[in-house]
Amino acid sequence: MAFLHPWALAIGVAAVGLPLFVHWLTRPRPYRLPLSTLRFVREAIHQRRAIHRLRDWLILSLRMLAVLLLAWAFSRPLMGGRELAGGDPAGQASRVVILDVSQSMAAVQRGIETFERARSAAAEHLAGSPGLRGGLILAGAQPHRVFDNLSTNLADLRSELAQARPRPERCDAQKALIAAADLLSRSGGPEHRRELIVITDLQASNWRTADFSVLPSDTVIRLESVALEETPGNLAIVRAGPGGRAELGRPVRLEVEVANYSDTPRTANVDVTLGSASYRLEGLCPANGSVVLTGDADLQDAGWQKGEARLVGIDDAIAADNVRPFVVDVRPQPTFGLVTREEADRRPSSSYYLERALSPQSARESAAAERVVRIPPSQINREMLAPVDLIVVDRPGKLEADAINLMTAMVVRGKPMIYVASEPTDAANLAMIAQAAGADLKMPVEFAAPAARQSRRWLSLARYRRDLPPFNIFGPQVVNLVEPLRFTRGLDTRVVDSGLQDDVLAVYGDGTAGLVWTACGAGSLAVLNADLAESNLPQSAAFVPLLGELAGNPPARNGSSHARHCGEPMTVWLPPEAGAAQGLQIVGDSGETQEMGELVEEPAGLAWRWSSAGPPGVYEVLRDGQPVMAVATAIPPEESDLRALPSAEVGDRLAGGRKIHYRSVTAGSRNQDDLWTWIAVACAAFMLVELVALRAFRT
């Protein structure tokens, strides 16, 4: 027999002494009475003493049994054992237990947390037996080995197991299997048996890509699933933050995405706090779908502001994913750096069109010049690029390697770039940018100078992603605005297999890419493959909003407003105005300053590196008490989807040619777990019998 809460038994044993203590305190005390004769008194006392003794022992026994049964019920006993598949033969054995500690293990059904079932199962596999050496791996975003090597000290392993709790992070199943393979490979011998016990809820998002073939070939693999019998309904906030750039004095659109992992539609009520203001967002979330709730917020203070979105009035399987923190960087209106060799007074020209489109609200040319700073290619330096919010490159000619490296470093750190490719030299510049960015940039196409005989005049867009930015802002009118557009010149393109083809947002009729928009480190790179001076795009009503989307809504997936996932490695580039690392301090929501990564000065700038992002909250980098950078951490969205991997896929696709002994702990313990209810009924029955006995003895 196993117990989910064995501590209750110890409390019950201690509490059994309470009825004895009360019985001793309430025992009758002798006292003197003046009587003329004692013969009849002695007879009456003798009769009542026998009845009182019977009553006292009966009531005391009933009370002690009731206390013991109550403690037994609280311990949640499970009848029957959990024998290992294939038996447990005697002899030398090395056993590694992988225990899933991801956020999904905190799901609650029928009042029991999934992790408690998993803990009970893991404790039995770490029970002492002759010749057994054990190891325990807590599988989260990073696998945590309790001991670096297998050990016979199973008592300490069980002690660590008792203190383990689910973490607000995902489970990297493959990393846990690799860690287990390392432990098992260092134990061996011809008579030695290797065992791997995996206890998990088999959440599909975590285990779908697991591969057991990394284990030694003679390993006996046993997988115990604690997945809930019926996937419980769960509502979660999977994304929260501003929809685009937050500018001082202008309303910003707040976006909160709520996912409904259940078979019935549910109403989502979300309270959003941003700084000192609060907002209420409401909407209907469809079954097994999601909805994006939006609202406008007025931002009157510049700098970094903390925010939080919270679901209210929700009772579901996981409470932790009903709250999601976020941060907003409120900045003044953006400044654009236009890198071009064209003169400002040349009209019309490609750079002139870009300058007017980037600052369409500036009625005076002097005001437009304040927001758009022309930077000659020969004068590119850190002082010129640091203040601008967006780098626009148009007809720069052949750029020097130092200028390329500096601009690329700025983009990797989070500054977006728009490159208008119209000349053969632009192909060489883009190739150097890709080389300088390295692994931070995966271009879906490679740009090359067009062949001499290739005609690139009046090209139309054969395909474009009307469901994605920047084309989705036009709504139903997108066809009427895009179809008349004609483009001239530009570069030839070749598909790159290692790139993401979804980043090609528009394709010309000749098959070349017209618009590419991809992430580059923390920033983004948009390439418009056309000569604006010889195309009709600048005369179209689509030009200003299209360029505004490219300038103000970069697709970088690790932008500062998006929350980092708890437990994952994190690298954040601090803005240039943060200065040197000396004098900066990293603090969390509660003011703690320990184990929050480190600030590293690199050639590209100052980076904040954290090997494992902390629990959900907002973390700030302060100088003299004022934030120069803020980052929010949150639970990975996939942890809210509690759907488990079908058992058939475990043996077919994940096994990697190995035999996996599989069993469902939940299905096997359904009847076992009902025992506590009958014990509780017996406890109530003993208490009722006690009342009847007291009534019968008229006391």
Image (cartoon, grey):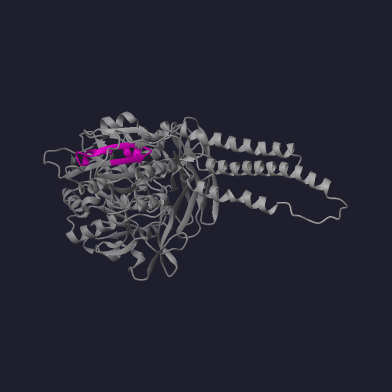
Quarter of the picture containing the C terminus is top right
Residue 581 percent across, percent down from the top left? 33, 68
Quarter of the picture containing the N terminus is top left
Residue 244 percent across, percent down from the top left? 41, 49
Residue 317 percent across, percent down from the top left? 48, 39
Q: Is residue 655 left or right of residue 467?
A: left
Q: Is residue 420 left or right of residue 116?
A: left
Q: Examine the rendering and report whether any part of residue 195 can be seen.
A: yes
Q: Examine the rendering and report whether any part of residue 499 can be seen.
A: no
Tell whether position 307 is magenta.
Answer: no
Nearest the viewer among 193 and 264 is 193
Q: List the single residue furthest toward the top.
A: 648
Q: How many marks?
A: 0
Tell whether position 197 is magenta.
Answer: yes
Q: List the single residue furthest toward the left.
A: 452
Residue 258 percent across, percent down from the top left? 46, 40
Q: Is residue 32 left or right of residue 479?
A: right
Q: Which residues are magenta?
A: 196-223
Q: Is residue 475 above or below residue 275?
A: above
Q: Residue at x 18, y 57 (%)?
A: 399
Nearest the viewer among 535 and 32 is 32
Q: Residue at x 49, y 56 (%)?
A: 249
